[in-house]
Every structure is written in C-alpha cells, then in structure tokens.
Image (tube, grey):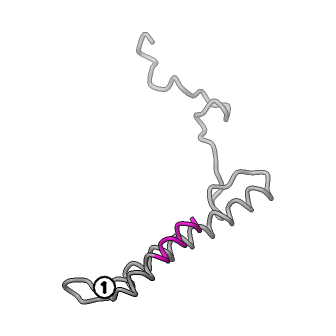
Amino acid sequence: MFYLSYLSYRYVNRVAALNRVSPILQLPLYIVWSAIPIGCFLTGIQYVLTFIKNLTVKETWLSFESRFEYDEDTPEAGGQGGNQGLEGSDA
C-alpha cells in the first residue's frame, strides 16, 4: 500500500504541475485526487499495525481493534457444521 501511495502521489504531483481543472466546477483536480495517496498511506499504516499485533499476541486479529472469531457452526469450533438444512433430504 505504501508503494501505491507513492505512485499515486507522483501522479497527483504531475496533475498539479499541468494545472488541470474539472470541466464544470473549475476545481483543481489534484485536490480531488489527493484523496487516493492519503487513503493508500492510511491503509498501509493500518496493515502495519495489524501485522505487528498479530506477531505480538496469540489470537488472530483482522484489524488493530477487531479480533477474528470462528463461527459456532464450523467443524473447527466443535459445532455440527456442514449438514444444516439437510435433515429431510436423502443426501
């Protein structure tokens, strides 16, 4: 994500150097498109934080604040799993 942030930052700088504006609002396009490198950079930070958290604790975390939990009905969690809704069939 950091690499994508870098590439999009370079692109936004190129657009800013060309002084491109939107057709109707006459807004500079680099202002609108600057959301892409900012979003990619923040996503990269979130990935790094989650990676560090998964290295330091025993549980698996989906994000820095959200832990991964198995469903009750999966075979890994000790549930029935797989045969729900098949009681009346010949399968």
Q: Nearer the viewer, residue 4 or 60?
A: 4
In the image, is residue 3 part of the stretch drawn in magenta?
A: yes
Q: Residues within 10 Å of mark 1 (few under 14, many from 20)?
A: some
**Magenta stretch bounds:** 1-10
Q: Residue at x 63, y 70 (%)?
A: 45
Q: Quadrant of residue 52?
A: bottom right
Q: Report the quarter where the N terminus lies.
A: bottom right
In the image, is residue 81 part of the stretch drawn in magenta?
A: no
Q: Residue at x 43, y 79 (%)?
A: 12
Secondary structure mainly formed by the magenta segment: helix
Q: Nearer the viewer, residue 39 or 17?
A: 17
25 w.r.t. 91: above or below = below
Q: Where is residue 91 drawn, in percent x and y? A: 45, 12
Q: Residue at x 47, y 72 (%)?
A: 8
Q: Quadrant of residue 66?
A: bottom right
Residue bearing the label numbered 1: 20
Work out which residue is located at the far top of the displayed protein and give it.
Answer: 90
Q: Is residue 29 left or right of residue 22?
A: right
Q: Is residue 70 left or right of residue 28?
A: right
Q: Is residue 40 left or right of residue 19?
A: right
Q: Secondary structure at mark 1?
A: loop
5 w.r.t. 67: above or below = below
